[in-house]
Each structure stands twice: as C-alpha cells, then as structure tokens.
Amino acid sequence: METKPVGDRRVRRTRAALREALVELVLSRGFQAITVEEIAERADIGRATFYAHYRDKEDLLIGIVRDLAEDRERLLPAFQQARIEGFTGLPVKYIFEHAEQEKPVYRVVLRGEGDGRALREFTDLICAHAESAFRARAEELGVTPRIPLDVVARAWTGELIGLLTWWVENDTGYSAAEVTAHLRDLSVYGRVWATGLTPSDAPGALDLTS
C-alpha cells in the first residue's frame, strides 16, 4: 500500500483547519464580515501559511466546493449501478447523505455566501455530472431525448439544489432515503401523478404561469 508523504498529510490538515474555520465564521457572522486574518487565527495558523495555500478568502470558499465535488466521487459506483439497474435514485441519496454529514459546509455554499460564486460553481459541477449521466444513459439505450439534455440537466439540478437547500436548513422530518424516494418518484412519474391528479386533469391543472 502506498504511503502518503508527511508533507501531503500536513497540507491536508492545514487546509482542513482553514476550511473548518471559514465555515464556522461564515455561519456566525457572514462571509463579507470576516477577514483572512480572522480565518487564520481561528485555524491557529500563520497568515503567511494561509497565503501559501489560498489567494484570498474567496479562493478558500471555492476550494471548499471543489473538495465537496472530489469527496462525492464516491458517487461514481452508484452511477454505474444505476445504469445497470435503471433509475434507482442512489446517486441522489449519496448527495443527501453527504450533505447530512457535512451540513455546515453545505449551508455556507447553498446560502450563496461569497456573492454566490461558490453556489454557481457547485451548481455547474452538479449540472455537468447530471448531463453526462443522462447522455450516457440515452446512448446506452439508443433513445433520442425529447428535450435537449442540457435543459433537462439544468432543470433537474435546480430542483435538486432547491430541495437540498430546504432540507439542510430545516428540520424537515425527512431522512435522506425518504427525500430521495420522493424526488425519484417525482422524476419518474411527474408532477401530475405526484399531486394526485389523473391525466384527464392535467391540461392547465398545474399551470402556474397564468
């Protein structure tokens, strides 16, 4: 088994301490109100050490988003399993489980702290992953999408992030498995089915634009 160099472990510990400090400070005071000096002091490191890892506090916040994305790479086996078994909802369940484990971090990102840049990056990463998965599934089954897949992926991502934001900010009473099951059924059967309507009720029944 390959042994990680001591320097690598030290870098990971330093960055983890900085990210934890940022999250704690943002949740208590807001992103705009805090400084690099305060983040470094909370992390118990020197200001120079901070700048050895990040350009500024915005760079640190974006680093947190990218770390979340890397951490979720463990979703890949679930995507592969979903392609074999059909639409299982497993990738979404893993996202909610990950958010449950890292709730303070998700709150900072999903609230749009840092002028929303981190949230936009988070959204784009999820959307790109979703579009890739939808495209691979369509190609595997030899089907032609009825709606452009970039539109499908963006709509799906917006729905997921809206639900995820509500879930991490509130005591909803829904477990990760339960909320995933609801989102899965909504995706498979649609809003008409979800609201208890029948196809004959559908025309105009859920038109919220008029």
Image: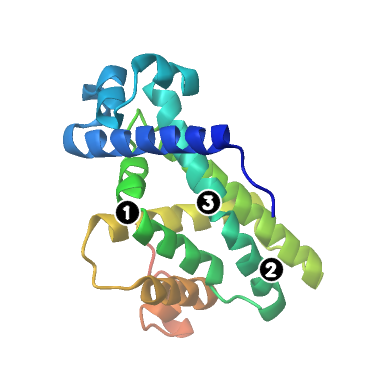
Which residue lies under the disc numbered 2?
80
Q: Is residue 25 left or right of residue 209?
A: left
Q: Earlier in the sequence, mark 1 or mark 2?
A: 2
Q: Earlier in the sequence, mark 2 or mark 3?
A: 3
The location of residue 192, given as percent across then percent down, is 43, 76
The location of residue 8, given as percent across then percent down, is 56, 35
Q: CA distance from mark 2 to mark 3?
A: 17 Å
Q: Amino acid at mark 3?
A: Asp
Q: Please name whichever residue, 36 or 43, is drawn nearer the observer in this view of the structure.
A: 43
Q: Secondary structure at mark 2?
A: helix
Q: Amino acid at mark 1?
A: Lys
Label drawn at residue 103? 1
Q: Secondary structure at mark 1?
A: helix
Q: Amino acid at mark 2?
A: Gln
The C terminus - image quarter: bottom left
The N terminus - image quarter: bottom right
Residue at horizontal 31 percent and vertical 33 percent from the top: 22
Q: Is residue 23 above or below residue 189?
A: above
Query: How many numbered callouts?
Result: 3
Which residue lies under the disc numbered 3?
71
Q: Please name whichever residue, 112 or 70, is drawn nearer the observer in this view of the structure.
A: 70
